Amino acid sequence: MAGLDKNESELWDAWKGAAEKVRGKVRGKVAADITAKTGLSDPDFGVLTRLVELGDGKLRQSDLARSMGWHRSRLSHHLTRMEQRELLRRRDSPDGGVEVEVTSAGRSAAVAARPVHAAAVRRHLIEPLSGRERDSLRAILDHLSDPN
Amino acid sequence: MAGLDKNESELWDAWKGAAEKVRGKVRGKVAADITAKTGLSDPDFGVLTRLVELGDGKLRQSDLARSMGWHRSRLSHHLTRMEQRELLRRRDSPDGGVEVEVTSAGRSAAVAARPVHAAAVRRHLIEPLSGRERDSLRAILDHLSDPN
């Protein structure tokens, strides 16, 4: 079987380029603005939003590692530093494993970060598109996300 | 400013989900098939295709690092291992810096990898879409990739 033809290759390059650009701009913008406002790094923000949004304030450390796509030991080192800054606390879970819980300082920082994140998503994904393009993109993405 | 509303948030989640799914499936499938056929890892494949496609066989090590999005020292360690396997060679460049050049074994491996990569891109990005969806996705992605 041959490589991609010109049309296929251009679609793939356009896909990779846009995906990386949107991801990079949103993360970069969020990271810079959040650090300026709250002192959180991009991984701090990732941890805190997962605790608040997925776990209603707490998650098992193993579930958090899976959701971040991080190795256990990398996450563990990072959580130790966040614990020292009183953004979260850890305790042994009654059913084994470790539970990670956001503190009120961690929750405030996550809440302060949310509008900065929203502004970056709007600027780099939503506002460049017309209403019709948004609808059409949504339908295409749902299509691509079907299990296959 | 508030967080994202429901529609905005759904578009953002659909975007992240599809981007990660396509990227993960293509990389995962390519990585597994290529390793089985040629012994190349995913980063090996990334290095060799850049040398062959961007540099016509050779690139400055600093340009390769930028293109991979890797830190200099990580790339340098990786290239040392690839050099030991005779997939590439390095030499001091006359204008300073280091030049990385693919060997004929490295080029053969990259060529063998190409159709595997093409099959994965077709299966996960191109074939799930109708012709009209492909055209429309291409236009939307070009729009998102405009500098702004």
Image (tube, coloured by chain):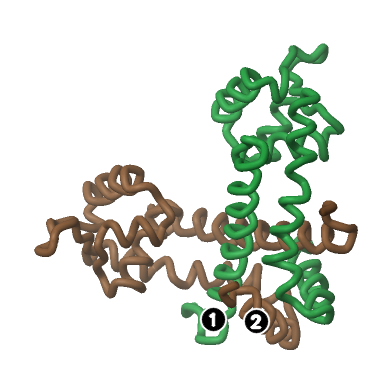
Chain colours: A green, B brown
Identify the residue at image location x=60%, y=37%: A70
Relative to A121, residue A87 above or below: above
Q: Residue placed farthest to the right in the image?
A: B6
Q: Is residue A90 left or right of residue A80?
A: right
Query: In this figure, which residue is indicated by the disc labeled 1?
Result: A10
Label pair 2/1, CB-CB below 8 angstroms: yes
Query: In this figure, which residue is indicated by the disc labeled 2?
Result: B138
- Asked which secondary structure carries label 2, the reply is helix
Identify the residue at image location x=80%, y=63%: B11
- Asked which secondary structure carries label 1, the reply is helix
Q: Give the label on residue B102, or none.
A: none
Give how far apart the Cα atoms at labels 2 and 1 are: 8 Å
Relative to B79, residue B52 above or below: below
Residue type at mark 1: give it: Glu
Q: Position of residue A86 (x, y in %)?
A: 69, 20
Host chain of mark 2: B
Residue type at mark 2: give it: Arg
In the foreground, B72 or B38: B72
Neighbourhood count class around disc 2 (C-alpha, 10 Å): few under 14, some 14–19, many 20 upward? some
The image quarter containing residue A125 is bottom right
The image quarter containing residue A54 is top right
Q: Is residue B105 left or right of residue B75?
A: left
Identify the residue at image location x=75%, y=68%: A126
Identify the residue at image location x=25%, y=62%: B60
